[in-house]
Image: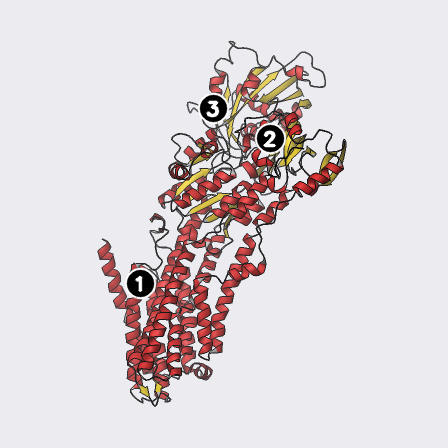
Amino acid sequence: MTDAPADAADVVAWHALASTEALERLDASENGLTEDEADRRRERYGENALPENGGGEAWRILLGQLRDPLIYVLLGSTALAILTGKVLDGAVIGGVVVLNALIGFVQEYRASRAIAALTTMVPSAVVVTRAGRKRSLPAVELVPGDVVHLEAGDRTPADLRLLRARGLMIEEAALTGESAPAAKGTDPVEEDAGIGDRRSIAYSGTLVTRGAGSGVVVATGASTELGRISRMLGQATDLETPLTRQLGVIARYIAIAIVVVSILLLGVGLWRGYPLADAVLAAVTLAVAAIPEGLPAIVTIALAIGVRRMAGRQAIIRKLPAVETLGSTTVICSDKTGTLTRNEMTVQVLWTPGGLWRLGGVGYAPEGDLSREDGALEPAPPGGVEALVRAGALCNDAALRQDADGGWSIAGDPTEGALLTAAAKLGLSPDRAREERPRLDAIPFASERQFMATLHAEPDGGRAIYVKGAPEVVLRRCDGPGDGPLDGALDVVHRIAAEGMRVLAVAVRRPESVPDDLEEEDVAGGFTLLGFQGMIDPPRPEARDAVAACKQAGMAVKMITGDHGATAAAIGRSLGLAAPEGAVPGSRLEDLSDEEMRDVAARADVFARVAPEHKLRLVKALQADGHVVAMTGDGVNDAPALKQADIGVAMGITGTAVSKEAADMVLADDNFASIRAAVEEGRRVYDNLVKALAFVLPTNLGLALIMIASVAAFPIVDGEPVLPMRPAQILWINLVAAVALALPLAFEAKESDLMRRPPRLVDAPVLSPFVLARTVLVAILMTAGALALFVVAYAQTPAPGSTAYASAQTQAVTTVIFFQIFYLLDCRSLRDPITAIGPGSNPWIFGGIALTLALQIAFVHLPAFNVVFGSTPLDLRGWAEAALVGAVILPVIGMEKWIRRRSAT
């Protein structure tokens, strides 16, 4: 055997070699390998199995969840709380860390199963020829040079160079994206042919739908096309989302600020005469106050709420951050077959010698109307059209079936299903036609012949041969040229094909005497052309609206498919995608530099005959240009690009297990239109998360300012510093009240201009100048109000151990709570006044306020809470003063909104 490397499939163009030459290169023969030779090759090439290189050990994945700045801050917060002696407080904060780590672990562990799902596409047993005898053996034992036999229903166990093929049809949609099974043969093809055009190769994992054949193994395991996709899945990076990137930035800023300010506060305390333990306690309290302990829970739960809402709109989220990522997506790269189209071949054009006709209706449902090219509706199909569609239904192996729920489906080849549906749309029952003209014999379709022929008994006692196939092949068997219907027939074919349609010719011959068995010479000539049927996998009607809506929302849509260029361009134009020079072929992408690829990816909207590595490279090129990329798809060929994209969107019905495991989101209804709903939900989730941030952060800054002011200015009484709040009380505000009030914002209704805005810039900070300014303004008001009431109450009996001291602290805490309640109403919209927001649009807001008030009443008046938190009951005046001071936020923020709206105009 030659010394070809184990990945020879990558460097040898087996599809361009004659089958005899391929056998010579492999040092093999049609009699197969001997057992000894097979054992030697297995030692060299290894087992025919995909490497498990994508799973990762569970403990490593779990530890990886702790490598996040926000987690570092939370771990620091836990330690600081414990250092203050508040073990329970530290346990609560640590619980948040554990919760976030577990959620992240589940997400990543499920995603790591993407490569493992590929193994389900390799069959367990195959039929091979070894030492001249056929035998069955485990597919894992195959080696290059083995001769494998295939029949209908088999899944190809390795990459095969075909040696024999009889009517062999293989469904390759998972690899190529083509909706129709590919006809296979033994003749070599051009060396630069794309995967979908390599008719002499049967690829690992593809399904035999018809016929039989045999082939020599040219690649196994990781060297197969399926193995290359597995390697690309391992190379594709799981990217951070815009939200997680920004939260990381916020966490770093918070961590730095906490360390700096805590050190400064420690120094100030010591300078003012604080005992060392009290100075450390003040610094620790500041850290607990400044850390937004409830923020991770708010983000996680808000995203989870988005997940539930999206599920109700047919978008199943597998990874929580994907909810937000959709809202900032700038480019959607979509597969064609089954995503933008129905994955139901449909006859749309009929041509007979009587003229060109358009057939309405899409998919397999037998409803439609017939109209001439000039648009005049015919009350009934003309005789020529009736004969054409009847012949297409007779020369046919498929079956049209109605499901229990009233839907229609096809059993068999989608192309033949389209012919049956065309007949049914014109009122001709395929089943009745077959009863009236029973089939006597057939010559099945083969790629070498490019036609199928059937022999039928006619109602008048005669017999007829029907043939359908490639127009140039069928026309050669028809009478002519120069005799009526054949004049200009090829021009008609080119005209229909220019619309991106596949064209089949149908002809009939009525011989005087035909034997019972149909032979090749019986179909050599003498046929009468009945006409042409032009078919296409039509776009989903809702996909057109979805594409338009995505464009209106500032997102580009690009169609990336393995289908033919003309078909892709036609579908693209019908969807409103730009294809001025036609579809960009994958072969053109081969030799482009990275810079040229970025230019082509930016300018073109339609790409055809695209291989998996092209899809992956296109996604990377768009990302290099600063785009947030969503990639939709349903096949194995889409999986690497789905994983590389900022958000991968798989199809729930037609999608393979590999594509679903690699994706961040699955469309339950396979409907591209559901993406628009998902984008809307994603934008709303992000909007509401910003509102939650704008609500939570002022509380933390305000609490920090309260601690700074008290350490810098409040007295030291009897050797003990006076503090307006205890650490436990600060944690109460952060973990109970802030969460209970912030979470209802996740249910806030969408803003009116949500889908008219451009996507958020990738580098746009979550903490925009507006959010920062708002945070400072609210924090200052909160600090001033809480300290003022604390000073007034404390002045009555200025002793740290007195009831008045505890009452003053309780009043300060209650004042902050009322500030939060009233500020929450302002945060329902960061732009519009409270009066412009419908009070019933989000009842959760008022439920959260009621819950917070109930909890605060317990904090103030229940003895158990008084013991744990050091609080004490307030009288009615104390409650009223806290509420009035907290309400100051309403007119101030109302004025701020008015000024910003005036400035914007």
Residue 69: x %, y % from top left:
43, 63
What is the distance, in whole Å, between disc 1 and disc 2 at their CAs?
62 Å
**Kind of residue at disc 1:** Leu
Q: Earlier in the sequence, mark 3 or mark 2?
A: 2
Give the structural element (helix, strand or loop) at label 1: helix
- Give the residue at the far top of this rendering: 482
Residue bearing the label numbered 3: 496
Q: Does residue 319 show up?
A: yes
Residue bearing the label numbered 1: 772
Q: Does residue 699 show up?
A: no
- Give the residue at the far front of this rendering: 3
Mark 1: few/some/many CA within 10 Å (<14, 14-19, 20+): some
Mark 2: few/some/many CA within 10 Å (<14, 14-19, 20+): many
Residue beneath the point at 28% across and 67% down:
777
Q: Quadrant of residue 60?
A: bottom right
What is the distance, in whole Å, between disc 3 and disc 2 at their CAs?
34 Å
Q: Taking 674 as reference, is 450 left or right?
A: right
Residue bearing the label numbered 2: 14
